[in-house]
Image: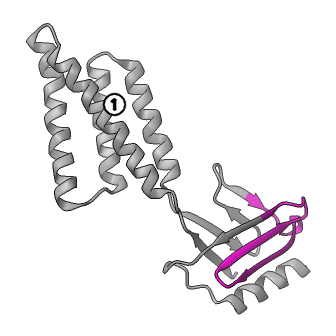
């Protein structure tokens, strides 16, 4: 069976990454504050070890200019564990929630178009059946999905990940719609 994968641009990825780094810096400041104001050395050590590890990772990220999702996930995980160890469960939960939201927003958006159905990359993934469509067309690097519910979805797909032949794709869609 023939199928097509169309990769959509995630234009807000830079904003999401910067916002996540901002959240991590706030976590670092709060953890550093709790560490410096701790009453005894045991509590101080619970906070200083993660601070050193996190600072080392942040310095590595800045030097290497690698602000990847993997490094950000590691930092979110370290902060979550640090908050749990220090007994701040609500901060651990908030940090974990930000990590989950970042991963949802930073994922690759791929529309999978197959003979059985179309998988649209919402959260959770929406499955669109061919009988729910008026038309679907790819023209000039713009994908247009026209649903019978009077909903129109358009996406610009102008990036290097897409190697879809427009004529072949449109012919495949015409055949599926005519069934």
Is 6 drawn above or below residue 119 in the view shown? below
**Left or right side of 84 for 43:** left
Q: How packed is label 1: few (under 14 Cα within 10 Å), some, or many (20 or more)?
A: many
- Residue 131 is covered by the magenta coloring: yes
Residue at horizontal 12%, vertical 14%? 42
Q: Is residue 27 left or right of residue 19?
A: left
Q: Residue at x 78, y 70 (%)?
A: 145
* Residue 9: in magenta span: no
User: At 39% from the left edge and 44% from the top edge, which residue is drawn?
Assistant: 20
Q: What is the count of numbered marks?
A: 1
* Residue pictured at 72% horizontal, 68% vertical: 154
Return the residue nearer the eye: 38 or 171: 38
Q: Position of residue 9 (x, y in %)?
A: 55, 67
Classify residue 84 by image quadrant.
top left
- Say whether residue 175 is left or right of residue 91: right
Q: Based on the displayed image, in which of its 4 quarters is residue 117 positioned?
A: bottom right
The residue labelled by disc 1 is 80
Please identify the residue farthest to the bottom as the structure is shown. 167
Which SS class for mark 1?
helix
State left or right for residue 46 relative to residue 126.
Answer: left
- State which quarter of the image contains the C terminus: bottom right
Q: How far across and down, in percent of the image, does residue 36 sit? A: 15, 18
Q: Quadrant where the N terminus lies?
A: bottom right
In the picture shown, does residue 116 fall above or below 100? below
- Rendered location of residue 70, percent (x, y): 33, 53
Span colored in magenta = 127-152
């Amino acid at each position: 069976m023939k199928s097509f994968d169309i990769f959509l641009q995630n234009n807000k990825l830079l904003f999401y990454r910067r916002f996540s780094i901002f959240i991590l810096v706030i976590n670092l400041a709060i953890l550093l504050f709790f560490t410096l104001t701790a009453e005894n050395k045991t509590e101080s050590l619970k906070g200083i070890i993660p601070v050193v590890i996190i600072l080392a990772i942040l310095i590595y990220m800045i030097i290497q200019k690698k602000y990847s999702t993997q490094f950000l996930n590691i930092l979110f995980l370290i902060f979550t564990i640090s908050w749990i160890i220090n007994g701040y469960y609500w901060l651990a939960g908030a940090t974990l929630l930000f990590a989950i939201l970042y991963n949802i927003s930073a994922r690759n958006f791929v529309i999978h178009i197959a003979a059985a159905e179309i998988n649209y990359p919402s959260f959770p993934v929406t499955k669109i059946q061919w009988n729910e469509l008026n038309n679907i067309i790819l023209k000039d690097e713009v994908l247009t999905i026209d649903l019978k519910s009077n909903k129109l979805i358009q996406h610009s797909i102008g990036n290097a990940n897409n190697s879809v032949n427009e004529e072949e794709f449109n012919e495949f869609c015409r055949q599926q719609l005519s069934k």
